[in-house]
Image (tube, rainbow, N blue to C red):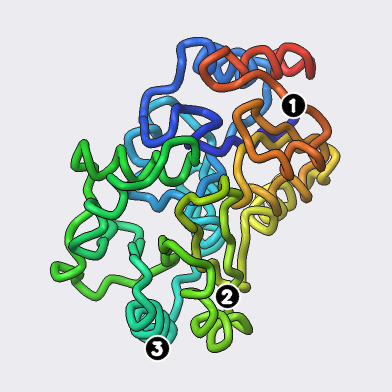
Amino acid sequence: MKLIFLDIDGTLTRPGENVPPDSALQAIKKTQEKGNKVFLCTGRNQDMLKPLLKYGFDGVVGSSGGYVTVGDEVLFDCPMTDAQRDLALRVLHKNGVFCTIEAKTGSWGDDNIDAFLKEQPEGNSEIERWRKALSENLGIRPMSEYDGSPIYKVVVMCTKEEQLAEAKALLEADFSFVVQEVKAHSCINGELVNRAFDKGRGVRLVYEYFGLTAADTYGFGDSMNDLEMIQTVGTSVCMENGAESLKQISDMVCPSVEEDGLFKAFEKLHLL
């Protein structure tokens, strides 16, 4: 049995979308019929990945590793503390950073974040995800409506990296600042991920649950928030549309999501 871990935005689907290409669904079904198991491994929270669960995945490494399941069994659940959340938002907002916070049941964004996103160029899968989510009203509510639910992750967007400096000084002991690879003059975007978890550790929890080793795992991603997954799995694959630095450390680069990349990679790796 092999375990396959799939990022969503820019890997399984076009950024911000919830319908994988037919070829990807065919690949997933065929490999499961061979006895392999397929997991979503994503920065999305449970609410934002929920539309994909109907496709029959075997579990989830969600919220960048903060919430891990096999079937209906929860292996790991680690939201940040209220104090960590409040400090992060206070310092980030003080420096003009746009924030979105993610719980299991929903996401809340700064009220003017949609105007900020409209000004940003295309080409970054995370920016495209948020632009799509806002334009199609995929459950991101105004920060003023936040209900106090436990938060797993803070997504950040700003125009200059120095806007994150104070937050890094105060929070970097507890949180990794995962900044996406961006083109010159583009928006700085990324996320604060608790150092208590990451996608790689989520992958490890799953393969240990089945009594397997890293050699039995395959990981597919496209952006720098997939780094720990790519470093952990036995066979790592970056999409052609992915970050150049991720391609350099992956075992294989496959065609983009628009070019049936997952099906072609599964076929080449004898997973079908």
The first of marks 1 and 2 along the sequence is 2
Q: Position of residue 128 (x, y in %)?
A: 40, 39
Give 149 or 193, whichever is nearer the viewer: 193
The first of marks 2 and 3 along the sequence is 3
- Disc 3, SS: helix
Mark 1 = which residue?
253
Q: Position of residue 244 (x, y in %)?
A: 71, 39
Task: Using a 10 Å C-alpha cutoff, classify the residue at mark 1 as few (fewer than 14 neighbours), some (14 to 19) or many (20 or more).
Answer: many
Horizontally, residue 130 falls left or right of residue 266, namely left
Residue at far left of view: 145
Classify the position of the N terminus by image quarter: top right
- Say which residue appears at 18% left-offset and 63% top-offset: 111
- Badge 3 vs badge 1, beta-carbon distance below 8 Å: no
Horizontally, residue 102 falls left or right of residue 69, namely left
Task: Using a 10 Å C-alpha cutoff, classify the residue at mark 2 as few (fewer than 14 neighbours), some (14 to 19) or many (20 or more).
Answer: many
- Say which residue appears at 45% left-offset and 71% top-offset: 79
- Say which residue appears at 49% left-offset and 36% top-offset: 123
Classify the position of the C terminus by image quarter: top right
Mark 2 = which residue?
175
Q: Position of residue 97 (x, y in %)?
A: 37, 70
The image quarter in which residue 150 lies: bottom left
Q: Tell me the distance, in whole angstroms, between the alpha carbons under discs 3 and 1.
A: 41 Å
The first of marks 3 and 1 along the sequence is 3
Q: Which mark is residue 83?
A: 3
